């Protein structure tokens, strides 16, 4: 039986690398984007041609439509990777309600809705695996107020959902990343240098390094891993500064 994987925010950087890796592992991967042509192009370019769906993850009704599509077309979902993200550099003093709502809806509410809808499909088909892409840092971050708040919520959502869903053989884990590939919201490096002295390994991460850990977590080699938040950050979080 063909295994089905949904990767949110999967047309560039980390999300695209995850989609490509899972496709290479034999999954039929569903690509998502706010831009239909972009999603269609990435789906067609995968090692195994995938499917695509256009939606805005800040809109709850469009997320529901995505899972209606998955249920009708495939009748199952084996893997969900929550990766979509929005960020705007702002302090608590600069964060207006519009920025707050868009960030929380995109980064936190979408993870909740996708996880819930995915779990409803998975529990009727013997289980599955959910991986949330979050931040490795356990510290605050200046001028990243709403983004960091949303990611903190994802971390605790991972732990709570893991306990709720383990009895259904649905394993929920997370991967915490730091500087990896292109910055969120950009298609190129936007001035980001590959070499980075603040990272103990001396460089930023490659998207494929995150994708490889996702592939491990959803595989039969990780069947006893539940509620883990694995840092894939080159040692950034344990560094003193």
Image (tube, rainbow, N blue to C red):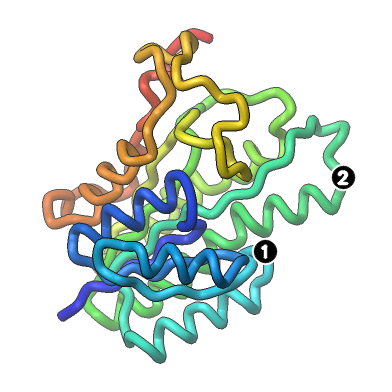
Residue 222 in percent (x, y) is at 17, 49
Residue at x 44%, y 66% (from the top left corner): 31
Nearer-N-terminus badge (2/1): 1
x and y, in percent, of residue 155 in the image:
49, 44
The x, y position of residue 77, in whole percent, is 32, 75
Q: Is residue 152 visible?
A: no
The disc placed on residue 79 is none
Q: CA distance from mark 2 to mark 1?
A: 17 Å
Callout 1: helix, strand or loop? loop
Mark 1 is surrounded, within 10 Å at the Cα level, by few (under 14), some (14 to 19) or many (20 or more) other residues, namely many
Q: Is residue 59 above or below residue 220?
A: below
Mark 2 residue element: loop
Q: Is residue 22 above or below residue 92?
A: below
Mark drawn on residue 58? 1
Disc 2 crowd rating (10 Å Cα; few below 14, some 14-19, many 20+) is few
Residue 191 horizontal side relative to residue 123, left or right: right
Q: Residue furthest bottom?
A: 72
Q: Residue at x 18, y 55 (%)?
A: 219
Task: Specify whether 179 is left or right of 226.
Answer: right
**Left or right position of 183 against 173:** right
The image quarter containing residue 163 is: bottom left
Disc on res. 96: 2
| The N terminus lies in quadrant | bottom left
Q: Nearer the viewer, residue 86 or 149?
A: 86
Please state which of residues 119 and 29 is positioned toward the viewer in this rendering: 29
Residue 66 seen in this snapshot? yes
The residue at 34%/36% (across/down) is 230
- Please give the count of numbered marks on the rendered protein: 2
């Amino acid at each position: 039986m063909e295994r089905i994987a949904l990767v949110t925010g999967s047309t560039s950087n980390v999300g695209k690398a995850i989609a490509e890796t899972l496709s290479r592992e034999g999954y039929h991967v569903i690509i998502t984007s706010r831009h239909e042509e972009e999603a269609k192009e990435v789906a067609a370019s995968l090692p195994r041609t995938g499917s695509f769906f256009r939606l805005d993850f800040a809109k709850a009704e469009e997320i529901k439509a995505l899972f209606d599509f998955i249920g009708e077309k495939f009748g199952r979902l084996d893997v969900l990777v929550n990766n979509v993200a929005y960020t705007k550099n702002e302090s608590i003093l600069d964060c207006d309600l519009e920025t707050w709502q868009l960030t929380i809806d995109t980064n936190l509410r979408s993870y909740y809705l996708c996880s819930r809808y995915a779990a409803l499909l998975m529990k009727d088909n013997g289980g599955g695996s959910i991986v949330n892409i979050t931040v490795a840092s356990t510290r605050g971050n200046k001028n990243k107020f709403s983004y960091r708040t949303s990611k903190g919520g994802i971390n605790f959502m991972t732990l709570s959902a893991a306990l709720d869903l383990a009895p259904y053989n649905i394993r929920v884990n997370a991967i915490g990343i730091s500087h990896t590939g292109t910055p969120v919201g950009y298609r190129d490096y936007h001035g980001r240098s590959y070499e980075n002295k603040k990272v103990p390994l001396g460089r930023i991460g490659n998207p494929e390094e995150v994708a490889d850990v996702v592939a491990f977590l959803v595989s039969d080699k990780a069947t006893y891993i539940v509620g883990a938040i694995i840092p894939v950050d080159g040692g950034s979080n344990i560094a003193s500064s």
